[in-house]
Amino acid sequence: MAQLFPYSPRKNQEEIMQEITEALEKKKQFVFESGTGSGKTICILAAALSYALENQKKIIYTTRTNAQQQQVILELRAIKQSAKDQRIYGVGMQGRGNMCLLAHDDPEIQNGSSEELSRFCSHQKKLAVSGKNKGCRYYRRFLGEKDRVDTIMTWAKKHMPTAEEFVQTCEKKDVCPYEINKLIVNDALVVVVPYVYVFDKTIRIKLFDWLTVSEEDVILVVDEAHNLPDYLRELFSAELSTWMLNSCLMEADQYGNPSLADGRISVTALCKEMMDIVTVLRDTYVYGMIEGGIRRISNEKNDALIPSHELEIELLSRVKITSKTLKDIINDLLAYGEKIQEYRQKDGKLPRSYLHSLGVFLRFWTTIEMDQYIKLIVDAGDGKNPRVEAYCLDPSIGTDVLTQVHCSIHMSGTLEPLDEYRDSLGLPLETRLAVYPSPFPPENRKIFFVRDVTTRYEELTKDKTIVPQLWHYVSEICNRFPKNIMVIFPSFNTLSMFRRNGHFAEIQRSLYVEEQQMSQSEIMELVTDFKSCGDQDRLGAALFSVMGGRISEGMDFPAEQLEIAVIIGIPYPKPTARQRGLQNYYDQKFGKGWEYTVQAPAARKMLQAIGRLIRKEDDRGVAIILDKRAPRFHRYIKDMQESKNLLTDISRFMNQ
């Protein structure tokens, strides 16, 4: 492994690589935490590549976001250049929504589910094969211009582009990047993919087919592993909203309104009953029970737990059917929805059917194991789009692949408590757990907190001076220090509140703001422009981002690209019914509900944001936590200290 490591090893890196090698040799899982910027990616790649080359294995490197893929490809390039070994070759893959060139000009296609995009793509390819100048033009060129495809493949193997660079090159050549990627993946030693490629079983089967490997020949890496449990919970959850049911009604109006279960009820009547049931559940459980004709409306919550069989019992009662008839209704919805998908496909549209999705939801809702789920009613869209939700509490239901592969390696800069991560994912008790300290000089980083502000809701409503004082800190820091500064808000709602109040106009330097609906390319362009403001002789800029978002986690800001990070408030999860259900589940399973589901996730988000500051030995930076509750996190942020005079303390550190 040493011969593949392209840099001078830092503190702990040789030990990390040795631990990875031992895990690979023993076919054991390895979970470790090492400070942000400590070189985890290069350690894993160097050790895993050495083992893979000697033992005919392939590496699947999973990331939460597409942006995190770039760092892996850059490190692979460094290894290949240093080792001069042509066998070292990696490919970045993204979903069809990002790689399909037809989707670039069509938002509907871009936002399609993986199943919809797969069906759409298959149909377009069949049309292209049939000739007559039909189907996807990029696929036609892929089939008909072998020399052009070979040129791109040769270029990709030589230059090892990021996924974004690969798509741009294919777009210039008018050839489908997704299909070429599938060809070159087979020759790759390392494949870098979003989580969904591994943890969605349908997509995983395709990936392993393209790689032509079995599970036992795969080394699986989970990057930013602290995100995986929540990702899996979302992946295996399901919801049904009023908006969705309205879409079902419009679909029935367009394609017909057949009867279900031998005439027991029409599609339209079923959807209207379902909409009314969802509304009644919302009124009953979220707003409060009706007592004496008076409804007690509460603005303090927007979701509530509902009894596990309440929705179907209400439906059976209203429509006067049995459970067996409900199964017949579900099957009819699925069949009718598939017919609609075929009609839309023939019209060249995305094969989407909301009625098919309704059937899938009802089948899921009526068959899930309730010891691993809770059922919720959620008041969303300002009361206009309530929904029912089956929320997965146990992420281990989707982790069978972790023990099927040769070895899985999980790493993050913020993963403590490691035993909680291991147990949540159902990893074996003998899984190796390790924590490595930061290799950087501690004097290069300062973390301050103040005691006169908070984002705690109860205090904000009582003391109207807190919000102005929060903004005073933000504006003074941004305007006083000619450095690149990131201000990280607890949510997009909080960020929008300051924007609505006109506060942004007070920032007297270039200001970049992360928007919730930004595409990946827009995010990357925003970050690139912000970084350039920290270059020599520049006066710096302010970047407003969101805790736990795409910018505050996983992106590198070395040296002058970021020198001050301001964290507004403690990013505790909202005290929703969903959160209470999760906390109760962890209390019952591990006896540590608060620690595992509230305190640790908040600490991880703050540490991820702070970790953007120091990426190299000579980087320096200061982080500020604007919340009096910060001392509760001394266990996780040991070098945090109170500031009585914040601007003076920042200035003193910056001038050292």
Image: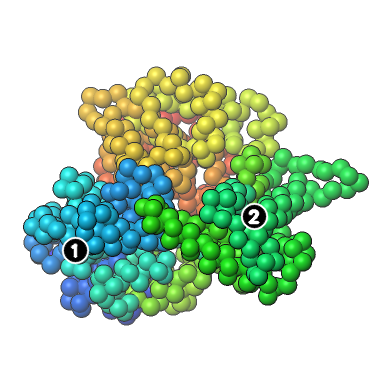
Query: In this rendering, does residue 263 appear at all?
Result: yes
Residue found at x 34% / y 27%: 541
Figure quadrant of residue 257: bottom right
x, y percent for residue 331: 58, 70
Using the image, tell me which numbered label, if any, was put on residue 122. Answer: none
Q: Are marks 2 and 1 in contact (CB under 8 Å)?
A: no
Figure quadrant of residue 565: top left
In the image, is 16 to the left or to the right of 266?
left
Q: Amino acid at mark 1?
A: Ile
Mark 2 lies on residue: 268
Q: Which image quarter holds the N terminus?
A: bottom left
x, y percent for residue 341: 45, 59
Residues 335 and 402: in front is: 335
Q: Which is nearer the N-term, disc 2 or disc 1?
A: 1
Mark 1 lies on residue: 184
x, y percent for residue 525: 30, 37
